[in-house]
Image (cartoon, helix red, strand yellow):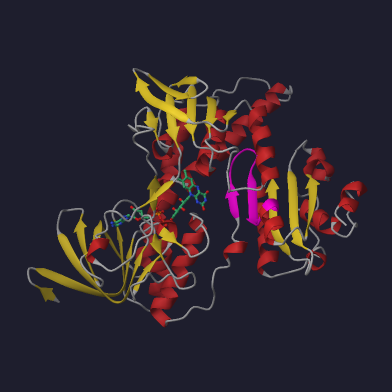
Amino acid sequence: MIVGEYTMDIYDLIVIGAGPGGYVAAVHGARLGMNVALIEKEYVGGLCLNWGCIPSKILLKKGAVIEAARTMIEKGEIQGIIHPLFESIIAESRERVEAIREGLESLITSNAVHLLYGDATFTDNKTISVTLRDGNIKRLEAKEGIIIATGSRARILPSLIPVDREKIITSKEALMLTTLPKRLIIIGGGVTGCEMASFFRSLGSIVTILEQKEVLLPNIADEEIIKTLTRGFKERGIEVICNAAIVRCGAEGNETIVATHEKELRADYVLSAVGITPNTDHLGLEHTDVALQNGFIPVHPNTYETNVSGIYAIGDIIALPDRIHPPMAHVASAEGEIAAEYIARKKSSWIINYDCVPSVIFTNPEIGSVGLSESRAKELYKEAIDVQRVRDSWMGIGIALKQTGLTKIIREQRHKSIVGAHIIGAYATERIHACAVAMRAEETTPTMSKQIMAHPTYSESIREALLAFDGKAVHVPFMHQKRAQ
Ligand SMILES: Cc1cc2nc3c(=O)[nH]c(=O)nc-3n(C[C@H](O)[C@H](O)[C@H](O)COP(=O)(O)OP(=O)(O)OC[C@H]3O[C@@H](n4cnc5c(N)ncnc54)[C@H](O)[C@@H]3O)c2cc1C
């Protein structure tokens, strides 16, 4: 169709942003029979693939191997000196990202999704203008729906932490550094701050985390898990300073300086990890009727439709009623599936139960959680909860490999259903899924304890914790089981 000087391309569904939310929505929509355009201004895979989940996990896994080798040297089991080649490690992670990007691009296009590289802005509630990479402009119209999946970027607090992307950086630059920081100050002890601290420490940097709240991972993890992580970090030589109010931060020559009320710290880099900002500011939303709430887009919690019929939003940019939306890749993808189904069929066969969404932190030690923390469960269930804990050091594999770790399961007393599970230690990011599945299936702890786990695995601790609710766990000291009766 030709409109004035522009051609107007008409699609059933237009998706803006090809991160884990947008590309899954686009492919799902195409498989449901819709004619789909997916617009991406930078790289397919979004923050997750290019500067988030994937590169950070490559680096963290490599860091964990280096640290394990160092421990074996200390124990006299390996001879030699570990000398990590930081630049090669970073280069390899960038190569893997590019390889996945290529595969993803062909996944998208082989599903007949029309992938357009360009910057999308709304012109009204139904039309989008795309400034393509070659400077040309394309106009697109959506017959059935538009999904906004433009994600987020690191939050910048310029008057407090003047990020210059050279010495005062965010996680994006940290994942592409070419020299290993000798000293690194991380401002913000949330998930990104803790993961970055864990990686750089494993390569040998001297790391300090400054967190303004009382604890690391505030409102993110269970209190006992936070204590275990903090202790583990300190044992690894990571300095953790909580209740830290920053009064000054800046670069001076080759150094950076951060001052709190109590002390002044110097390092070669400062990494600012103080949260996220939704990418809703350059989208032309002012040409639509889409409502915003502190920059985020409020949506219906089951359909992801915004206040404007036919415009949906998913992933890091959304705000849910009555709960904080978890900014995680797997959540964005699931929301993308559902939104695409609503646009194609006006219904979906499922809704996300946000209480059962697992969250994982790839620090050393790893953390996996699902559901309520102990303090939140006590509040919600008015103390009518039971808690069971199993230490890895009580279990065969934990003793064999000298691992410390904790599995903690919380159930409500009336139905004996799990309302929270928290694991810290080896493979916690994998182990947690058994608990998430049980929670989603609304299984009681006696029923779930009938599922045996393979030996010798760390997952055995989950069954032991379930059995301990009824005083039946063979490897849990009896006094710990009785206390929960
Ligand atoms: C260091 C780090 C580690 C992380 N690790 C994990 C992890 O282990 N597990 C996990 O679940 N989550 C992790 N996350 C969070 C995860 O990356 C995000 O939750 C996820 O990427 C959000 O997906 P999304 O689809 O909403 O948006 P994004 O991944 O941000 O994708 C949005 C896309 O939209 C594009 N876009 C924006 N505006 C426009 C426009 N106007 N026109 C066209 N395109 C546009 C962007 O270029 C981008 O590609 C991590 C984040 C960071 C920073």
Give the image location of residue 463, x and y in percent.
80, 57
Residues 291 and 152: in front is: 291
- Residue 293 figure quarter: bottom left
Give the image location of residue 369, x and y in percent.
64, 52
Let me know if residue 368 is in the magenta part. Answer: yes
Decide if residue 99 is in sight here.
no
Image quadrant for the N terminus? bottom left
Residue at the limit of the structure toward the top, as seen here: 253
238 versus 216 height, above or below: above
- Residue 282 figure quarter: bottom left
Count the numbered circles shown.
0
Left or right of 3: which side holds 49?
Answer: right
- Residue 7 figure quarter: bottom left
Left or right of 250: which side holds 376?
Answer: right
Q: Which stretch did the figure color magenta?
A: 359-375
272 versus 30 height, above or below: above
Left or right of 238: which side holds 404?
Answer: right
Give the image location of residue 440, x and y in percent.
65, 68
Left or right of 315: which side holds 243?
Answer: right
Residues 207 and 274: in front is: 274
Residues 27 and 303: in front is: 303
Image quadrant for the C terminus? bottom right
Instruction: Residue at 47%, 72% (x, y): give it.
Output: 338
Give the image location of residue 59, x and y in percent.
51, 38
Instruction: Residue at 37%, 40% (x, y): give it.
Output: 156
Let me know if residue 460 is in the magenta part. Answer: no
Instruction: Residue at 74%, 51% (x, y): give it.
Output: 408
Decide if residue 14 is in sight here.
yes
Residue at the limit of the structure toward the left, as seen here: 5
